[in-house]
Every structure is written in structure tokens, then in C-alpha cells.
């Protein structure tokens, strides 16, 4: 092999320098076979050269065809499959849209008293993708903008770039600037590509905090909310309903934004205005709330809280004939304007960590033992199940004793012979022990049927009110206790259940709804806060919110009339006699619910309706931790009735 290489090298060397070399014929003959194996013969030289040149050309052709196929595929995708988006992107290179904010709908009470309006607010934002590509140019913009809006340049830069320079959503830089600053910024906006100053109306709550938990509040949309509503035209600088009516009716209250379209040059500067789309304001809401009644109820409840030396309570007024909420008070309360204007971290922490929980909407979220206000419902159930009738009487002599356990009446020595109306009027525990768990010749409903009837009255589930996130309370039964407490259900649990103690928990709105069904003769209505949706431009009605019946004939009218009679006697001869001097006849039920580790605390309850027997208003009063219902809750109702019927 080495000899062949030497011969080959010699030949190559000779061919490069033909003048220097002369080969002997004997040498050529001697190595003729080797030379033929190394170099092609004259006859094969053309074929060899052709083959050598064809292989690279074939490879080049394959590469060319492959690249052409990719190019054609890409063009097909861009122009056919994604043509519309490609066109929009191309347009976006020379056309910019500036959002013109739509005003949010106003909110009124039933008498058209304005409760929520909008006020102008100037804010500054930056669209990172519209900023110059060169860092030096961007820094000049940050520096000029920072001087105008009185912010450190570093903060402006950080806010503008923290989501990346490809971000096409507006980034809020400063949430509020004064009008003079906005005018100055507008005058220099041509030299600040990517910077926007706009009017973004904010909410002004005029209710003086009385309806904060009902109205709710708006705040800047979160990234999660934005991603869930991206296809509905929201932007990162938009406001969004966070709680209450503002959240529940977000779709109606929010308007449709307009836009101003401008042509820009390569540097992002506006060249000319192309066109403008006017925004459409959101729809107005008319509530069923009577603001005057709301004021009076809040004032009376606060006076009772002060008297009881407590801080927390709730009160509700309903129309029992259609479910309209006439007033809903939650104390303590808060100022919704703190949120709409952008609450500070310190203010939010103060509200959130307050032991009295001012952010809690007690009327729909608070869960409490009911005490004796539950008794009319169990009386109705026992009548309906024919466990008792109007004349069934039980001797109350201070309580009952089962084995080693005693279940007392609240009145030492008892109430004597007691039928169902007297039992309701005087809140006789012995009677309700008997109809719940059984005693002597009374069979008793038992825990399962007690639960069934409370569910019929709407307890143990949300009331259906048009507010988000209400609690459902708890109706205990043997299965629940076994799972939750790992204990069996005892007869004593049934007795406690029958007087509204033990593990039973209700919300104020649930109880107001249930008593409304007693008041109106047996129809369960869903509570409603919004009466009407109105066009904000011409003030014409868009939608009337009709009453929503959940159930009819919950209990027969005959048995409901017996229960109503007992509630009337509560006022004429029972635990709420203080209301007997009102100008209209009232029916009601007091309640004192024990709670705490050793039942050392008491909630004061009073529920009622008027005028009896055909009512137009139901009241539910709770003084949380207040004490006796007759002492601290009933006087609130009396005060409210005086106002309502005088008006």
C-alpha cells in the first residue's frame, strides 16, 4: 500500500512540475497496473468527472426543495390559516388604539335616591410594546415622564418593564393624577411614545357606609380575573366588581369601552387621528332598598349595640309578599370608597385584622344559633305532622328530667298548662322539648323530620339572594354528628335542637325568609335586592326583576294561621309586650341564643311582621352577644315600625 502511495505522490508531483521530471519507460511499464488502479484511464475520465460533479448537485437540489417547501408552508400558515391575525399585527405596526372608558352604571334606591355614582379620575399607563426599542430612547421617556408625574425614574422604569417589553396590555404607572398634570402630559404625549393618560371613572359611594356590604365595591382587576374575562374586552387597568351588588351585577353595570384610533410612525409617534368609537355606559340598577328605612334601622341598631356594650349586629327588613329586601344593615361597617380609590396596605390591614370584622356581611354570612326564634317553625311542623293540634296541652312545671339529665324551662316553676299558641307566646321550652324529642303522650318529630321541615322553610342552604357567597348555616342530624364529632346522637341533642340550641346554625337572611313564609301564608320567596335594570341613557326600563317563588304551601294555611296567632300573642301577652302600644298590630318572636364554651354568652334575637294578620313588612334583628332578645333586639324593631308606619 505504501508503494502505491509513493507512486501516486510521484505522479502528482510530476504533473505539477512537468518540466522537472522524466520517467523511464521501464518504470512506467513496471508500475502500469498500479498506475491504472490509481488514475482513471482516458476512456473513463469523463465518466469519473461527471459522477463526481453530480453528487454535490443532487444534494443541493434536495436542500433547495426542502427549504422551498418550508417557505411555502410558512406562507400558507401566515396568509391562509392565520391571515386575519397577521393582518391585525401588520395594522398594529402603524395603527394604535387608545381605550375610551365606558362609565359604570349608577345605583339607586327604590325611590330613585342616588347611592353610587362615578367621578372622573386621570391615570397614567404605559404599553411596553409601544416603547422605543433602544434603551437610551426608553430611558429618556422614563426620565421625562417621571418629572411630569412626580415619580422616581427608577419606579417608572421598573413598572414599565417588569412584565417584559413585548407586553401589549397597558401597565398602570400612576393611578391618580390631577387635571393640570393630565393636561401637561397630554401636551407632551407626542414625544412620549408608549405613554397614555386617560380618564378612568371611579366609584363614589354616597350611602355614608350604611350599605357597604350590600353595594360592595370595585377594585383593579386581578390577573386571574383578567384571564377569565379576556374575551370580554377587559384590560389590566380596568375596575372590576369585587363584592356585593357590584360583583353580582358586573355584567350589567359594566359598559362597553370605546376607542380612538391613530396612525403612528416608525418611532411610535402619532401622525394623525383615523377615527373614534364612542363608549356605551353600563346599565343603572334600581334596588328594592328604602334608603330612609336603611338609615333608621342602622341608627336604631347602633343605639341598641351601644346600650348592650357590644359592637356587632345585623338587621333585615323584607316584603313578605314578594321577597324584596327593604333594608339590610350590617354593623360594624366600612367605607367602600377606600377600595374604589385604591386602598392602602395599612388601611386594608387595619380592616382585615379588626376583631369586630367590619368586612363581614353578617346578614348573609354570619352563622349563629337561633335560640327561640326557631320555635314557630317547629310548631308548624308538629301541627302539619298531626303530632299536636290547636288544643293539645302540656303541663310546664319548670322543665323535664330524663334519667340523670334535666332540661329546664327558662321560667322557674314553669308556665302551667300550655298549648301551642301559648308555647310560642311565652317561649315555653317544655312544650318544644316534647314536640321535638317526645315526652309523655307526645310522640315528637325526631331529628330527621325536624331537619326536613327546616329545609322546607329554606334553612341549611343559600337563600337565593342576589349577593355572592352567602353561607348556608348548618342543620344537625345523627349522621352529621357521627361524621363531625365521632359521637352518637342522643335524645338530649334532639331537645336542644328543638329550642334552637346545640349545633344548629342559621344566617339572618335565612330566618327572615322563613318567617316571611309564615307571614304570607306559606309561600317561600327568594330574597331580592335589585328591582329593575334601567338604560342609563334614556332611563327606560330594560328588565323588571319579578318575584321568584321557591315553594308554595310549605305548610297548610290552617296550621300557619295557628302559628301566626301564637306570634301575635307574643306581643299582646308574651315576651314582646313592649311592642303592644304601636299604632298597628304586630306579631313576633323573641329569642336568646346561648353560645361560648360554657354557654356564657347570649345573642339577642327578635323576628316579627306587621300589620297582623296581613303583613307588608318582616323584621329580623340580631344583637350579637347582646343578651336577652326582649331587652336588646325587640326595641330596635319597635323603633323601626314607628318610623315605617308613620312614614
Image (cartoon, helix red, strand yellow):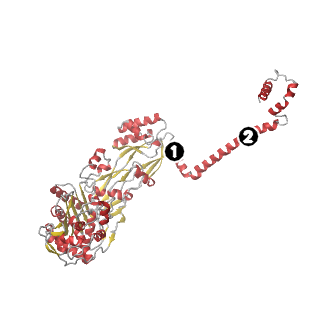
- Determine if residue 427 is in view: no
First in residue order: circle 1 vs circle 2: 2
Depth check: give the residue in front, 34 or 62.
34
**Relative to residue 236, is residue 109 drawn left or right?**
left
Most distant residue in the top direction: 20
* Residue ID for mark 2: 55
Estimate the x, y position of residue 131 in percent, counting from the top left: 46, 40
Q: Quadrant of residue 368?
A: bottom left
Estimate the x, y position of residue 87 in percent, counting from the top left: 54, 49
- Determine if residue 51 is in view: yes
Most distant residue in the front direction: 403
453 to 262, vertically: above or below: below
Q: Secondary structure at mark 2?
A: helix
53 to 619, vertically: above or below: above
Who's the residue at 60% across and 48% down the image? 74
Quarter in which the N terminus is drawn: top right
Q: Secondary structure at mark 1?
A: loop
Most distant residue in the left direction: 413
**Relative to residue 51, is residue 488 drawn left or right?**
left
Estimate the x, y position of residue 197 in percent, counting from the top left: 39, 44
Q: Is the residue marked by circle 2 packed among few (<14), some (14-19), or many (20+) residues within 10 Å? A: few
**Relative to residue 452, is residue 621 drawn left or right?**
left
* Residue ID for mark 1: 94
Estimate the x, y position of residue 570 in percent, counting from the top left: 17, 70
Quarter in which the C terminus is drawn: bottom left
Alpha-carbon span between mark 1 and mark 2: 49 Å
490 to 11, vertically: above or below: below
Amino acid at each position: 500500500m505504501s508503494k502505491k502511495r509513493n507512486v501516486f505522490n510521484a505522479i502528482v508531483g510530476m504533473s505539477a512540475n512537468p518540466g522537472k521530471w522524466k520517467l523511464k519507460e521501464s518504470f512506467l511499464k513496471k508500475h502500469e497496473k498500479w498506475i491504472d488502479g490509481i488514475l482513471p484511464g482516458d476512456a473513463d475520465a469523463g465518466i469519473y468527472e461527471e459522477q463526481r460533479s453530480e453528487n454535490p448537485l443532487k444534494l443541493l437540489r434536495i436542500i433547495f426543495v426542502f427549504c422551498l417547501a418550508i417557505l411555502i408552508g410558512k406562507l400558507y400558515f401566515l396568509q391562509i390559516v392565520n391571515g386575519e391575525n397577521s393582518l391585525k399585527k401588520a395594522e398594529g405596526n402603524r395603527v394604535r388604539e387608545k381605550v375610551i372608558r365606558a362609565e359604570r352604571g349608577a345605583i339607586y334606591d327604590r325611590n330613585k335616591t342616588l347611592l353610587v355614582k362615578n367621578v372622573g379620575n386621570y391615570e397614567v399607563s404605559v404599553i411596553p410594546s409601544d416603547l422605543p426599542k433602544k434603551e437610551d430612547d426608553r430611558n429618556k421617556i422614563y426620565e421625562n415622564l417621571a418629572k411630569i408625574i412626580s415619580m422616581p425614574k427608577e419606579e417608572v422604569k421598573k413598572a414599565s418593564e417588569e412584565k417584559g417589553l413585548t407586553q401589549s396590555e397597558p401597565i398602570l404607572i400612576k393611578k391618580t393624577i390631577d387635571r393640570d398634570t393630565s393636561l401637561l402630559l397630554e401636551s407632551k404625549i407626542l414625544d412620549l411614545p408608549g405613554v397614555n393618560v386617560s380618564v378612568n371613572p371611579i366609584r363614589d359611594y354616597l350611602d355614608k357606609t350604611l350599605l357597604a356590604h350590600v353595594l360592595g365595591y370595585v377594585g383593579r382587576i386581578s390577573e386571574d380575573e383578567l384571564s377569565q374575562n379576556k374575551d370580554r374586552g377587559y384590560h389590566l387597568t380596568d375596575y372590576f366588581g369585587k363584592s356585593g351588588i357590584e360583583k353580582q351585577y358586573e355584567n350589567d353595570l359594566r359598559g362597553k369601552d370605546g376607542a380612538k384610533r391613530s396612525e403612528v410612525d416608525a418611532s411610535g409617534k402619532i401622525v394623525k387621528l383615523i377615527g373614534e368609537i364612542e363608549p356605551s355606559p353600563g346599565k343603572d340598577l334600581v334596588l328594592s332598598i328604602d334608603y330612609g328605612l336603611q338609615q333608621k334601622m342602622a341608627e336604631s341598631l347602633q343605639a341598641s349595640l351601644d346600650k348592650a356594650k357590644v359592637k356587632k349586629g345585623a338587621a333585615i327588613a323584607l316584603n313578605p309578599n314578594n321577597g324584596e329586601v327593604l333594608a339590610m344593615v350590617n354593623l360594624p361597617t366600612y367605607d367602600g370608597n377606600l377600595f374604589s380609590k385604591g386602598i392602602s396596605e395599612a388601611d386594608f390591614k387595619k380592616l382585615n385584622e379588626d376583631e369586630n370584622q367590619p368586612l363581614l356581611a353578617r346578614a348573609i354570612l354570619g352563622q349563629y344559633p337561633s335560640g327561640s326564634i326557631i320555635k314557630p317553625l317547629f310548631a308548624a311542623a308538629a301541627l302539619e305532622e298531626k303530632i299536636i293540634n290547636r288544643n293539645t296541652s302540656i303541663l310546664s312545671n319548670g322543665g323535664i328530667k330524663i334519667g340523670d339529665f334535666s332540661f329546664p324551662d327558662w321560667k322557674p316553676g314553669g308556665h302551667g298548662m300550655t298549648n301551642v299558641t301559648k308555647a310560642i307566646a311565652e317561649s315555653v321550652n317544655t312544650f318544644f322539648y316534647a314536640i321535638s324529642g317526645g315526652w309523655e303522650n307526645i310522640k315528637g318529630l325526631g331529628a330527621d323530620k325536624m331537619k326536613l321541615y327546616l329545609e322546607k322553610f329554606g334553612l341549611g342552604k343559600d337563600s337565593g339572594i342576589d349577593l355572592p357567597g352567602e353561607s348556608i348555616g348548618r342543620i344537625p342530624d345523627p349522621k352529621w354528628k357521627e361524621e363531625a364529632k365521632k359521637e352518637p346522637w342522643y335524645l338530649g341533642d334532639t331537645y336542644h335542637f328543638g329550642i334552637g340550641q346545640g349545633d344548629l346554625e342559621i344566617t339572618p337572611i335565612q330566618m327572615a325568609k322563613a318567617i316571611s313564609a309564615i307571614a304570607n301564608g306559606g309561600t317561600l320567596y327568594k330574597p331580592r335586592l335589585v328591582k329593575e335594570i334601567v338604560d342609563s341613557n334614556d332611563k327606560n326600563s330594560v328588565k323588571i326583576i319579578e318575584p321568584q317563588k321557591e315553594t308554595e304551601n310549605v305548610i297548610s294555611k290552617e296550621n300557619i294561621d295557628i302559628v301566626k296567632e301564637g306570634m301575635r300573642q307574643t306581643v299582646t301577652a308574651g315576651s314582646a309586650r313592649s311592642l303592644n302600644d304601636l299604632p298597628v298590630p304586630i306579631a313576633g318572636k323573641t329569642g336568646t341564643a346561648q353560645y361560648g364554651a360554657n354557654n356564657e354568652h347570649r345573642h339577642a334575637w327578635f323576628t316579627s311582621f306587621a300589620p297582623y294578620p296581613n303583613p307588608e313588612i318582616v323584621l329580623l334583628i340580631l344583637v350579637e352577644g347582646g343578651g336577652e332578645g326582649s331587652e336588646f333586639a325587640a326595641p330596635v324593631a319597635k323603633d323601626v315600625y314607628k318610623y315605617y308606619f308613620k312614614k
